[in-house]
Image (spheres, rainbow, N blue to C red):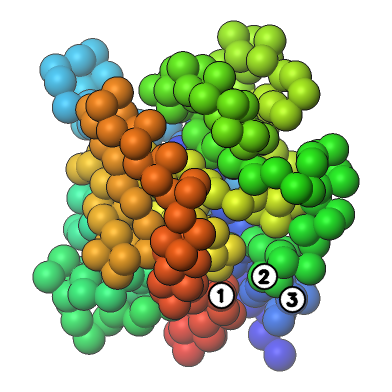
Amino acid sequence: MAKYKFILSGGGTGGHIYPAIAIANELKAQFPDAEFLFVGAQDKMEMQKVPQAGYPIEGLWIAGLQRKLTLQNAMFPVKLVSSLIKARKIIKAFQPNVVIGTGGFASGPLLQVAESAKIPTVVQEQNSFPGITNKILSKKASVICVAYPNLERFFPAEKIVLTGNPVRQDLINIDSKREDAIAFYNLNPNQKTLLILGGSLGARRINQLIEKELPKFLANEVQIIWQCGKLYFEEYKKYNQNGVKVVDFIERMDYVYAAADIVISRAGASSVSELCIVGKPVIFIPSPNVAEDHQTKNAQAIVNEKGAILLKESELDNEFSLVFEALLKDSGKQMQLSENIKKLALPNATKAIVEEIKKLI
């Protein structure tokens, strides 16, 4: 049997890197002697995360276009040409059977080169509203794996397969882990637990909100697991006290989800997919600083199915307290949100994506 070779590209944020690693792991489970190469942006977090997962990675000198006129924008054409040349060298040397892109700057040049070399390509779109890169790549891609329905207005309909986003397998059946999780975080099993997720780097506006609301939470006997992010840990660790656990990063996502009764979260694509599987009542506070306002659109897709609550950053001062207290006191509403978000879960996404890749080999 021929030895298969796969190139995967995705990065910039955990939301692009994690799905690429999950797909590689599933391919490796099915093709143990396959060869893998990752391609990322040379100064982004994938350059650490991918080798930690046990895969080699090459970096391209690429960055996104900023919305305002900057030196970085002036450098964009130079970086793009440099990346296309390097991508061509990588593909020529490695000779992959299939190239898989999960989004992020580096996947643009790489898939562009693969497509022009007639190598089968798979685009994995995590968001409910695709970015520019994937819209361009989709025209020549072999298959487009999506996580939300109704993306025909952005992509060629005949190429779309609804697979869902790859998520950590340890999040399936977390209910059985609740007791362990409560012990692990040293929580009171008779109190409600609120989980705050601001993404891997943290979310300044959410942190400010939690700091302001902390006395009310404690007065309502709500205990908190507060992931404030690496950038903000020094500032907020002083609140680490009885009933409040402040952490910069969460290793055991399965435990925090198992312990949580209510979740406040950003609406990055992989967080949304995880929360659908976990099925807890969620208040989404999307980041307004994300390209094309992806996060608001991701959250809105869940709200449209009555599966979550959405609050914009601009509404927090006036509305958060009322919305949160109403949800806390209404167990019927909590159950309804929980049941509706669970209906949107696609827990076998990674296997479904790998099935599509196998058809192309």
- Residue at figure coordinates x 51%, y 18% from the top left: 211
Picture layout, residue 246 above or below residue 334: above
- Of the residues under marks 3 and 2, which one precedes in the sequence? 3
Disc 1 or 2, which lies upstream in sequence?
A: 2
The reply to whether discs 3 and 1 touch (Cβ–Cβ < 8 Å) is: no
**Residues at badges 3 and 2 in contact (C-beta under 8 Å)?**
no
Cα distance in 3D space between marks 1 and 2? 8 Å
Residue 301: image quadrant is: bottom left
Q: Quadrant of residue 155?
A: bottom left
Give amino acid for label 3. Ala
Residue 196 placement (x, y as % from top left) = 55, 37
Q: Residue at x 65, y 74 (%)?
A: 27
Query: Against 90, is 66 above or below?
Result: above
Quadrant (top left/top right/bottom left/bottom right) for the N terminus: bottom right
Q: Which mark is residue 224?
A: none
Q: Residue at x 29, y 79 (%)?
A: 160
Residue for badge 2: 172
Disc nearest the viewer among 3 and 2 = 2
* Residue 23 visible somewhere in the drawing: yes
Task: Report, in whole angstroms, how far the alpha carbon at label 3 lies from the one at label 1.
Answer: 18 Å
Which residue in the protein does label 1 denote? 347
Query: Which residue type carries mark 1?
Result: Pro
**Type of amino acid under label 2:** Ile
The CA distance from mark 3 to mark 2 is: 19 Å
Q: Which residue is mark 3?
A: 29
